[in-house]
Image (spheres, helix red, strand yellow):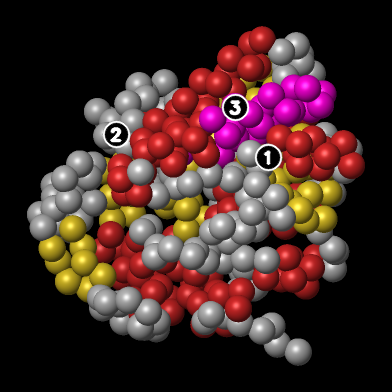
Amino acid sequence: MNILITGGCGYIGSHTALELIAAGHRPVIVDNLVNSSRGVLGRLKELTGQDITFYEQDFQDADAMRLVISTEAIDGVIHFAAHKAVGESMQDPLKYYQNNTAGFAALLAVLVDAGVRTCIFSSTAAVYGNPPEAVVTEETPCRPESPYGWSKYMDEIILHDTCAAVPGFTGIALRYFNVVGAHASGDIGEQSKTPPQNLLPVIVDACAGKRPPLIINGNDYDTPDGTCLRDYIHVVDLAKAHIAALNTAARTAEGSYRVYNVGTGHTTSILELITTFEKVNGVQVPYSFGPRRAGDPVAYSANPSKAERELHWKAEKTIENACRDAWHWQTKHPNGFDTPSPA
């Protein structure tokens, strides 16, 4: 199938492009490069031996998207393009509602008009907010606590209603937990044009001397080592979940809407992540403890059984894999996609 990937030059999008090719599909990338690099295209070619069709476009440009869809005979879309910083969304909510929500609604209108009937949507565990239970199922009430979380939850509702209204339209929303790691080759990984906020990239940058030592917010929680527990999923496992969702959508000829948690079902504490990173990479992570951060859940993990049962997908990589791969990416390409590949 010809699969359009919006935001395909980004962290998760680029890894998904690799998995699409491995599964025999043809990815077509649309990305405005606001928070990604054109350099990823060269790395993808090195890894796959294929030139990937690329359009430097904003997915909100309806005329441009119509042209891409018709020119490339697109069969389905995996939609990654979105703003994703919780803190920024609190400061500039309209930016998030315009791009993430209004933009997604406009994209769906283009898909419907063009006859494309498959959309895999990049959602987030942030739709749950601060849930009342530590293990989250798809039935856990969604109570976002940031404009970012609300923008993604609104998108889920829009996708659900589109599937209900348009005959044959299939939409699948994947709610990601904490995405970590990089491709085992060390040639693609996470590179943002803004300072990282997620824990593992902060650890990597601290060890590389790109930022001050890490501050752990709270070490007095009711957990085995006093630090918060989270569900970390390797980016390659997450990319494969999109292929599984695409395969499921292809089998759903009558159209439907489904939502899945994408996580491991296991928790790792902040200190465990640091200790593992140090052990597998032979480095010391500089860190200190600070006060608790308001609103942080003590423990938070996915129940991924629905995805295992219906998508026939299960996370396979370990936290050791994620730590090793993230550091390999950093040491092999210290300047990310601006680092020339070896001759």
Q: Which mark is residue 61?
A: 1
| Residue positioned 66% across, 84% down in the render | 340
Residue 267 in view here: no
Displayed quadrant of residue 33:
bottom right
| Amino acid type, label 2 | Glu
Depth check, mark 2 against mark 1: the one in front is 1
Asked if 297 appears above or below 288 in the picture, the reply is above
Q: Compared to 201, does 25 lie above or below?
A: above
Q: Earlier in the sequence, mark 3 or mark 1?
A: 1
Category of crowding for the residue at label 3, using alpha-carbon neighbours closer than 10 angstroms: few (below 14), some (14–19), many (at least 20): some
**Residue at image mark 3:** 105
Does the magenta stretch mainly form a helix, a strand or a loop?
helix
Local SS, label 3: helix
| The magenta segment | 102-127
Q: Quick check: 107 above or below 341?
A: above
Quarter the N terminus occupies: top right
